[in-house]
Amino acid sequence: MDTIFETFRSGGPVMWPILGLSVLGLAILVWKALEFRAGRRDRKGLAVVSTIITAEPMLGILGTVTGIMRTFRALGEADGAASPMAATAGIGEALVTTAAGLVAALVLLFPYNALDERAED
């Protein structure tokens, strides 16, 4: 469990909006699935999930950019004595946020498509 929290923290501040949107998207999908089981098959709320699915990879890319910026800042502050270790935190942040944004979107994508397919026009 510590590894999950460490990985989350290593992704930097962009991980928080990714997490928040993921929780919101999952909550809406659970709500819609329960409504569908009860016979109510409208599209209400699904547009929000679609927007979240689009936004999460973009947030991952934003984290990539901020992580690479952090890397260049660390290398620039090294004054010619740049160590490979100076770059690892920023590159790690970049990779973690990219992966988190993609995984979060994929987790929502398949149930969203299943519910959207069953919704009445």
Image (cartoon, rainbow, N blue to C red):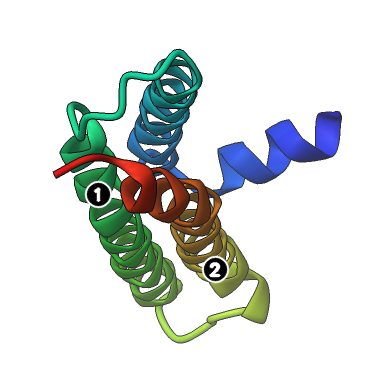
**2 or 1: mark nearer the eye:** 1
Identify the amino acid type marked 1: Ser
Question: What is the secondary structure assignment of the residue under circle 1?
Answer: helix
Lateral position of residue 46 relative to residue 20, left or right: left
Residue 11 at x, y = what percent?
A: 52, 49
- Indicate whether 107 appears above or below 16: below
Are there few (<14), some (14-19), or many (20+) residues within 10 Å of tag 1?
Answer: some
Which residue corresponds to the image point at 45% horizontal and 72% vertical from the top-left? 78
From the viewer's perspective, is residue 76 above or below residue 103?
A: below
Residue position for label 2: 95
Residue drawn at x 44%, y 41% as measured from the top left: 15
Give the mark nearest the N terminus, 2 or 1.
1
Residues 61 and 27: in front is 27
Taking depth in this image into account, of 66 and 100 the one nearest to the observer is 100
Check whether the beta carbons of the residues at disc 2 and disc 1 lie within 8 A of each other: no
Q: The N terminus is located in which quarter?
A: top right
Amino acid found under the numbered disc labelled 2: Leu
Q: Is residue 14 left or right of residue 88?
A: left
The quadrant in which residue 105 appears is bottom left
Q: Which residue in the structure is indicated by mark 1?
A: 50
In percent of width and height, residue 106 lies at 51, 59
State the image coordinates of residue 84 (x, y, percent, origin top left).
64, 80
Give the crowd class for mark 2: few <14, some 14-19, many >=20 residues within 10 Å.
some
Tell me the CA gap for discs 2 and 1: 24 Å
Instruction: Using the image as rendered, state which of residue 113 and residue 102 is in the foreground.
Output: 113
Name the image quarter holding the C terminus.
top left
Q: Kindly identify which numbered label has been placed on residue 96.
A: none
Q: Specify the quadrant of the image occupied by residue 89.
A: bottom right
The total number of labels drawn is: 2
Residue at image coords 24%, 37%: 46
Residue 34: x and y in percent read 49, 17
Q: Who's the residue at 56% across and 59% down the image? A: 96
